[in-house]
Every structure is written in structure tokens, then in C-alpha cells.
Amino acid sequence: MAVALEIHFFVAALREEDAPLPDRAPQSADRERYGYGGEAEELLLVRRGSEELWVPYSGETDAELDAIIEEARERTEAPAVGQPERRRRPPLRGLLAGIVLLSALAGLFWVVESRSGWNGLDSDARAAATARFSREASVVAEKPVTIRCDEAGDYVGAVQHADGVALVGGDLAYLTPERCLALYRLAFKREKRPNQTARAIAVLAHEAWHLRGVSNEGVTECYGLQSGVALGQRLGLSAESARAMMRRQLVENARRGETSPAYRVPAECRDGGRFDLEPRTSRFP
Ligand SMILES: [Zn+2]
């Protein structure tokens, strides 16, 4: 949108620069307004400094002509109809307007981003949140592990196309700020947003299973979605809500599996299947 606006300003400024000069002949509007320029009269273009006046002329003497010019000048104090004052806007002004607008948009984005994102939370809130995520991940990993939020984007994010990263069998995992924020909102503010909350729980559980020692992505995801039900409840969801969210994630996994087959859960990821963590129950996940 900003780029489109910039182009609009630029093109508009260029076009204005190239606008043709107005027709200098007396316009029909002038003829009507001043009542001259009829068949019998000749019109004379008179220049006076920067002014240009059309005056009717039919052989008057110099003195008479001066009076006529003076009269015409008074009448043309206001710009003639149909001959608007030519506005000159150099392209630079259009460009500047574009730059100012872009800067304002960028500034607004920065303010909204820094106040509303994970990085907008104060350091105490972030420390309390990551301590909580670490405790919950430790339950899933069955050993003490640490969860950090990758604020600088060094480990996870746009480049790696991942929401989290963990060393298999290790004790440290990173989540993207986006996932951390969704988990924070749920655990500390009791806020849930259907897709974001569900995905964040699934990612935390997924990384915890990597730390527990599972390397296969599909199997890790399968275990993660099952552990996500209890994890979601510990973070504040009702049992039904947590289960519905993880079931939905399992459905979406099949869809995502088309673009990233490595993350697709195996066929045995089903009730009573090889990867069912609770084979005696008929619930899955
Ligand atoms: Zn993974």
C-alpha cells in the first residue's frame, strides 16, 4: 500500500509538471463574461508586466486604448472562468510527501509492534513467562529443560521457517517471539485465540519432545499434539478446549504435510496405533 502511494505521488507530480500551458486565446467564457469579441470588434492582446489582457479594439486612439486597458485590468482581478490559475507543483514536493507518509507509517508500525508484541512486555514479565514455559516443557521432557524466546531471531524465525528449535536430547529450546506471546497471553492473561494459542501449545510440546530425545519430526509432532492436551490445561484451558485444539492441529498437520512432508505425522499416529501414548483410552489425541 505504501509503495503504491509513493508511486502515485511520483507519477502525479510528473504529470502535473508536463501539463500543457493554457490556451492563451480568449476563451468562450471570457467572451460571455466581458461581452466583447463580437463580430464587429477585434481583440487585442496587451501585455503589462506579467499580465496579459484581451481588450476589444476598433481603432481607438492611444489615450482611449489606455482607458480600455485599465478597465479590462480591473475586471480581470479575479481569474477568468474556464482559465484556472496554473499550479506548479515540482516533483520534489510529491516525493517529499511520499517520504513523509512512508516514515509516518513505518513509525506507527514500530510503535504498535514494540508495544503489543513479545518485545513490548517488560523484562520481568518475559522472565516470569519463560520460567513458566520451562517448567511446563520439563514436565513433557521428563527432565529439567530451559525454554527461551528467540527475541533477536538468531535461531528461529523467518530464515529457518520454524516456530521453534531444539537439540535432540538437549536441555535448551528456542521459540519464536510470536509463539511465546501466545503462550504468555494464555498463561498470564487468560486470553486465547483459536489458531495462535493451539499452534503455540503444539510447538512448545513438540520442542519438549525433541529435548526428551525424539528426533523424527513426524513422530515428535504426534507425541507433541498428545502431550499438548494436558499442557494446554495446565496453561489455563478447559479439558474440552485443549483437546479440541490439538485435534484441530492434527487435522491441519495433514494439510501442512503436503508442503512439508517431513513434519507429517505417521499413519500409526492414531487411536490404538504405535504412537498412541495412551493406548488404553479411546481418545486421540
Ligand atoms: Zn521438530
Image (tube, helix red, strand yellow):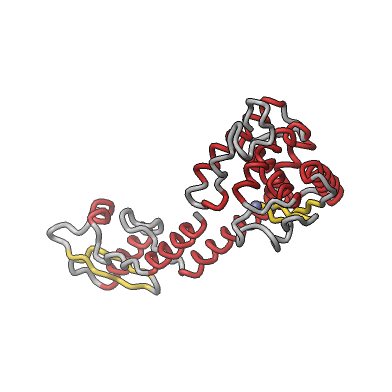
Residue shown at the point (23%, 63%) measured from the top left: 56
Residue shown at the point (39%, 72%) measured from the top left: 50
> Is residue 254 something one can see in this rendering?
yes
Residue shown at the point (40%, 58%) measured from the top left: 77
Q: Splitting the image into 4 quarters, where does residue 67 fall? A: bottom left
Report whether 149 appears left or right of 196.
right
> Which percent across, then down, holds residue 79?
38, 57
On the rendered image, what quadrant is the C terminus found in? top right
> Which percent across, then down, holds residue 117?
71, 48
> Which percent across, then down, holds residue 234?
78, 33
Report whether 268 appears left or right of 69.
right
Q: Splitting the image into 4 quarters, where does residue 14 fall? A: bottom left
> Is residue 108 something one can see in this rendering?
no
Image height of 98 relative to 279, above or below: below
* Nearer the observer, 242 or 76: 242
Residue shown at the point (81%, 41%) measured from the top left: 139
Q: Splitting the image into 4 quarters, where does residue 15 fall? A: bottom left
Image height of 273 relative to 264, above or below: above
Q: How many marks?
A: 0
Report whether 118 appears left or right of 64.
right
> Which percent across, then down, holds residue 97?
54, 62
Image height of 70 relative to 178, above or below: below
* Nearer the observer, 234 or 75: 234
